[in-house]
Image (cartoon, rainbow, N blue to C red):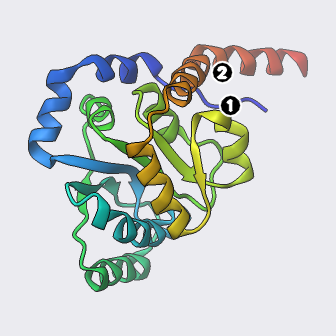
Amino acid sequence: MIPNGVACERFADAAEDQAGQGRWRDRLGRYVLTVGGIEPRKGSIDLLDAYALFHPRHQGHRLVIAGGETLFDYRDYRARWEQRAAELGIEPIVLGPVPDDELPSLVAAADVFAFPSVKEGFGLAAMEALAANVPLVVRDLPVLREVFGTAARFATTPAELATELDQALTADDPDRQTAGRQLAARHTWDTAARRHLDFYRSIN
């Protein structure tokens, strides 16, 4: 198995860029962030349900989705997602595509990163959040346990996700954040490329 890499330095630099983060906070306030499409695989409706449970204790935090679109035809799911948001009385902010050079500061400015996917192979967006020193809450999947270990908080249900989002905001957890930064720093694209080359050479 050869894991993905992550552009760790870009996101680590954004964690130190107060001006870049400030531009997003001026626009969005304080927020819980997720990155990706609104689709079944990403657990988008579960995230709405979790945020509705989380929000009464953290009314100053908005739910922000960077992206939202998908390559597949999930219009019916998107309609259910919008209906569920209306039923819950919440108004997520869907940013649409975010320019590549602005994404690191958007991630770094988040107070917590939510990654409730029900299917994943690695979790690149979540690894970028760790590189940016942002607390991470992910779905409790075997693959995400394997990738993130002690660097993330894990949840299965929307209620658990809400609890872990709350804990990520309120608990002082420097060991977990240090583990996250170190984990992201180990997953470089150079390392991934070298391992691919070594593998290809081994089977020639």
Residue 112 position in % (x across, y down): 38, 44
Of the two numbered discs 2 and 1 on the same chain, state the one appearing first in sequence.
1
Dots 2 and 1: beta carbons under 8 Å? yes
| Residue shown at the point (60%, 51%) measured from the top left | 154
Q: Quadrant of residue 148?
A: top right
| Residue shown at the point (15%, 40%) measured from the top left | 25
Q: Secondary structure at mark 1?
A: loop
Q: Quadrant of residue 203?
A: top right
- The residue singled out by tag 2 in the image is 192
Q: Is residue 204 visible?
A: no
Of all residues shown, which one is farthest toward the right? 203
Residue 138 position in % (x across, y down): 55, 50
Amino acid at pointer 1: Pro
Give the answer, above or below, for where 69 lies relative to 191.
below
Q: Nearer the viewer, residue 194 or 201?
A: 194
Residue 31 position in % (x across, y down): 26, 49
Give the answer, above or below, for where 148 lies relative to 139.
above
Q: Nearer the viewer, residue 88 or 11?
A: 88
Q: Secondary structure at mark 2?
A: helix
Amino acid at pointer 2: Ala
Give the answer, above or below, for where 84 lies relative to 105.
below
Give the answer, above or below, for where 51 lies relative to 198.
below
Residue 182 position in % (x across, y down): 57, 19
- The N terminus: image quadrant: top right
Q: Nearer the viewer, residue 164 or 196?
A: 164
Q: Is residue 195 left or right of residue 33?
A: right
User: Mark 1: few, some, or many residues within 10 Å (few <14, many ≥20)?
Assistant: some
| Residue shown at the point (15%, 48%) measured from the top left | 28
- The residue singled out by tag 1 in the image is 3
Marker count (numbered): 2
User: Mark 2: few, some, or many residues within 10 Å (few <14, many ≥20)?
Assistant: some
